[in-house]
Amino acid sequence: MAAKKATFEDNMKRLEEIVEALESGNLPLEDTVKLYKEGMTLSAQCGAALKKVEQEVQKVTETTSGDVKLELFPEEDA
């Protein structure tokens, strides 16, 4: 049976746990580096998930004639 893919919320929760652990300053260097790498990976995954959702969001605008139309959310230059 395949492992359940972590959700955005799962990744954010784990990222918060990692930040707390790193901020405590009570970890050996090896553990700190390991958690830092895991945190950077999770951060990249969460950023990619947010970007994907942002691109899917539609913006409702009203035209001058009063009609409503849907537009894709404009992409921002990174």
Image (cartoon, helix red, strand yellow):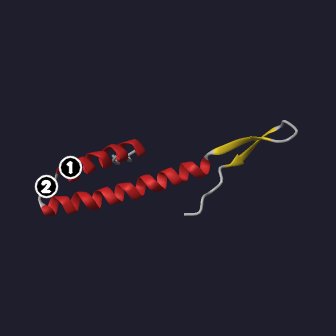
Residue 35: % across, % down: 23, 57
Query: Is there any visible trace of residue 68 in the rendered image?
Result: yes
Number of labels in the image equals 2
- Quarter of the image that includes the C terminus: bottom right
Q: Is residue 63 left or right of residue 5?
A: right
In the depicted view, which residue is nearer to us: 26 or 15? 26
Q: Residues within 10 Å of mark 1 (few under 14, many from 20)?
A: some
In the depicted view, which residue is nearer to us: 61 or 4? 61
Q: Which type of secondary structure does the marked residue at label 2 adopt?
A: loop
Residue 53: % across, % down: 55, 48
Q: Which type of secondary structure does the marked residue at label 1 adopt?
A: helix
Specify the farthest residue to the right. 65
Question: Who's the residue at 27% across and 50% down the image?
Answer: 19
Query: Which label was assigned to residue 11?
Result: none
Question: Who's the residue at 39% across and 42% down the image?
Answer: 9
User: Label 1 amino acid?
Assistant: Ala
Q: Which picture quadrant has residue 59?
A: top right
Q: CA distance from mark 2 to mark 1?
A: 8 Å
Q: Is residue 31 left or right of residue 11?
A: left
With respect to residue 44, does 61 lie above or below?
Answer: above
Query: Which label was assigned to residue 21?
Result: 1
User: Label 2 amino acid?
Assistant: Leu
Which of marks 1 and 2 precedes in the sequence? 1
Q: Residues within 10 Å of mark 2 (few under 14, many from 20)?
A: few
Question: Who's the residue at 45% across and 55% down the image?
Answer: 47
Question: Who's the residue at 33% across and 59% down the image?
Answer: 40
Would you name the residue on which mark 2 appears? Answer: 27
Q: Tell whether label 1 touches label 2 (CB within 8 Å).
A: yes
